[in-house]
Each structure stands twice: as structure tokens, then as C-alpha cells.
Amino acid sequence: MAKIKSIIVKKLNKVFESKSGSFEALSDINIEICKGEFISIIGPSGCGKTTLMRCLSNLEDATSGSIEINGKTPDNARKDRDFGMVFQTSGLLNWRNSIENVLLPIELSGKNISNYKNKVNELLGLVNLKGFEKHYPQELSGGMQQRVSIARSLILEPQILFMDEPFGALDHITREKLNIELLNIWEKSKQTIIFITHNIREAIFLSDKILVMSSNPGKIKKILNVDFERPRSDEIKKLQKFKNLELEGETLLKSDEDEKIS
Amino acid sequence: MKKLVELKWFPPIFFLILLFVVWIGSILIFKIPTYLLPSPLKIYNEIVQNLYLFTYNGFWTLVEAVAGYLLGGGFGFLLGSLLAYSKFFEKGLLPYVVGATTIPIVAFAPLVIIYVGFGIASKIVIAAIVSFFPLTLYTLKGMQSSDLNHRDLFYVLAASRFNVFIKLQFQSALPYIFTAMKQTSTIAVIAAIIAEYIQADRGFGYLILQSSYVMDIPRMWSAVLFSCVLAMSFYGLVVFFERRYVWWHSSLKELKI
């Protein structure tokens, strides 16, 4: 059975022009992502991970090449609300409490918010924020804020979810907890998730495939397949296969660092 | 002693008492006659004995200042919003708005009185003019200062221009708008008094001017202090609303060093 493609990227290039000259952020990126896949993008700082995601989510225009999201241009996919996004910082509106923040996408899409009251509570429960519905962002910890923003990205049930280092600023333990929560959510929703991270262990634990990028210019160096059975638990981190993948990923990232130095 | 310093009301009261001590002290030491510089007690007596005079004139000054403040501020907010909404209007009008802020109100006020008339309407217009430009500029600046992450979020969520304006730009502008409203709350009172100096039959400007003709310095001082209290109360009211509506903004939190 041929799988339905969520995202097809062909020969994508992105060049930033500025007064100090032009900078090639992405060069010849080719990706195909199937519906329902969990894909991680990993690479050193400045390798263009975020730029790639911003091109996919229509926040940047490609310099050349093509991007198809559900068979549409990124602009049309955005307007049809085919995808949601979780940013590096939670980006919650300070003047809204948790419920009001989660309801923002509903308001902006012109839907009636009163139909979503139950859904909001369900989502806040899903991200373990029961009892914090009326709290304002300033009253929540960084991890809680990021969980509110995840709930916000899920309320419209987008087919595709872009996550740009959502757990980057969190401590190790909170991060692992949220990884498990994210997998639980994904197993129920069967969305396509594109997930940026610095952390190779996180990438292996979560993904079906890992795109390893190298920098200057940003390229996809290798695609690692991760075929652990699902649902996954923390136990898989103890397997030899997991450790081998981790080593392979680290070697790929390191060799990129070495090239840069030499 | 340490506990007293930490009390919220103590620091301002301490300096007020210090002011009175220096004030009364210099009157006693330099033997300044009362008709030149009255003591705070003398001013208090003056106000209590002529309470109707001060409240009557104060009432009219306040009416002019508040009406002008709301009118000018309201229109300033609308113009600022328009400039933030449309690049065309911003490019076309902003230079003139900035230019207009340099008009000295003292020079312009007599013209307003000639055009608008001798009643309180002309005083309201003058108070409105000084409230108008700060609100325009701060509203514009505030609306342009929305967080870049929030803008990305609204873009990805395919928000309409109107929703970006109401749900993001307006909210982001509120702290700026309150800054302008605090500033203009006191200058609207000053503008009303200046307008009354030029021509009026009531209000503090009128009272101070009349008293100066007969060199009634205690009464002038009383009027000055009374109008300060008036302007400060007005300012306090705006701060009350600011705390209520933009409590979430970082400017209202104490700086830790």
C-alpha cells in the first residue's frame, strides 16, 4: 500500500540576503514525509533546522525549490489550517489564562468557542494541567507554559504538527516526562509530527525517522530509521540497538563539528 | 526602625514631613513674613476658611481637564490606531503629528479661545490638544511593539488582519497607552489652568490670577497646592485602572538587582 504523503520538499534552497552579504541557510533539501509519521530533525546550532521548519510553516519563503503540504503550497495549507506549530518559547499571551490561551486558535479561526469548552478541559488534562485552567502564564513554570502551548497547538486537531525545539529550555527530567506525554498524545491523534531537537536521545525515543543535518550550508546529511515497536516506554533506552543509534547519531553530529574546525 | 522603613506608606510620609520641617524652619530662621511665604498651617486655614471658593473653582478646572483629557485622549487613540493599521496613513500623517507636538500650547491657546469662544468649551479644547498627541504617538508605538513570537503565532494560525489588531496589537499597546494616559492626566490639568489664565470667569487659573492682582500670596499658594492634589488624584485614578488592566505587564513588577 502506497502511503499518503503529508509533506514533499524538492530541491529546496534558502538564501538570506543582508547588508553583510548573502548567506546560504539551506541547500538542496529533499524530503518526503508520510501521513502519521513522527520525524525528528537534528543538527548543530545554526544548521538551518529552524529555517527549514519556518519554510514548511510558511513563515519564510523558499528561495528556490518546491514545498507541498497536503498537496498544497505552504501558504494555502496555512490558510486551510492544515498544520499547527509549537515554538521554542511558549509564546503564550500574558493577558490570557490557560483556557483562554488554548482557545486562541478557535477564536482566530472564527469558530464558536462555546463548543470547545469540554475539549479545552480534556486537552489541559491530557498535558497534566488539571487545576491550572485559570492560571496566567506568569504563574506557571516554564514546563507548564510549554504544555499549555502544546494544548493550544492541538485544539484545532491539525493534521500536521511542527514542533521547534519545544522542550529545549527544560530540565532533563521534565523533558523526559513531556516526551512520554507527547507520544501518548500522538498515538491517539495519529498526526504527522515534525520535531526539531538538539538531543539525539530524545530524537531516537520519539521518532520513526531522524533527519540529521549539517551546517554551512544547511543540508540533510543522513536519514536514520528508528524501528522500535510502539507504544514505546523508557525501557527501550536500555537496549543495545538504542545505544548504537545514539552513537551513530553522535558520530554524524561530531564529524560535522570537526569539518567546521578544520 | 528597619520595620518602619519597609512600610509602604512610610517613605512618602517621611519626605512630606521633611518638606514641612524645612518649610516652617526657613520661615522661622529667615523671618520670612507670612504675606511672602505662608506656612503650611496658614495655607490649611486659608483652604478650610474658603472651602467653597476652592472647591467651586477646582470643580470647573477638573471638569475642563477631564473632558479635554477624555476627548483628546480618545481621538489620539483612534488616530494612533489608524496609523498602526495602515502604512499609508502612518507615512502620510506621522511627520505632521510629530511636528504638531512642537506647537507651544501657551502660544496656541489664545487662538483657540478666539475660535471656540469664552466658555468652558475653549478650555476643554486646549486640554484636549495636549492630551491628543501623546496618546497618538504612544498608541502607535505600542501597537508596533507586539512580540515577534506572538506575530509568528498569529500568522501561522492564519489570523485575520482585524484579529491581529484587536487580539494582539491592542493588548500589546495597553501598557504604552497607560503610560501616555498617566502623563496626560497631569498635563491636562495644567493646560486647563493655562487656558483659564488667558481668559476665564472661574477655575484655578482664574482664582490664581485674581489673587495675584491683590498680592494675596497665601491664597495663591493654596490654589497651587489644591491643584496639585487635584492633578495627583487624577493621576492616581489612572494608575488604579492601569493596575487593573495591565497587571500582567513586566513594568509593574519590582526590579530585582
Image (cartoon, helix red, strand yellow):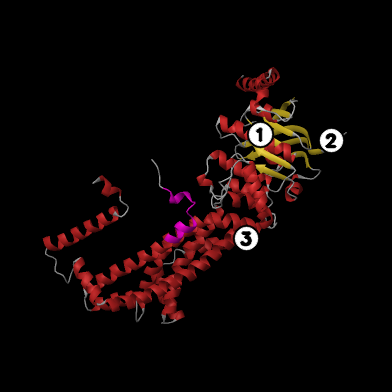
x and y percentages locating residue A109 in the rendered image: 70, 54
Of the two numbered discs 1 and 2 in the rendering, the one whose residue sits closer to the viewer: 2
Residue A98 spot, x, y in % from top left: 58, 48
Residue B88 circle label: 3
Front label number (3 vs 2): 2
Q: Residues within 10 Å of mark 3 (few under 14, many from 20)?
A: few
Is B178 placed left or right of A51 in the picture? left
Looking at numbered disc 1 in the image, what kind of residue is underneath it?
Ile
Disc 1 chain ID: A
Q: CA distance from mark 1 to mark 2?
A: 23 Å
**Element on which disc 3 rests:** helix
Magenta-drawn segment: B240-253
Q: Quadrant of residue B219?
A: bottom left
**Which residue was labeled with disc 2?**
A3
Q: Of B205 and B100, which appears nearest the observer?
A: B205
**Dot 2 alpha-carbon crowd within 10 angstroms: few under 14, some 14 to 19, many 20 or more:** few
Subunit ID for the residue under disc 2: A
Single out the mark in the foreground, 1 or 3: 1
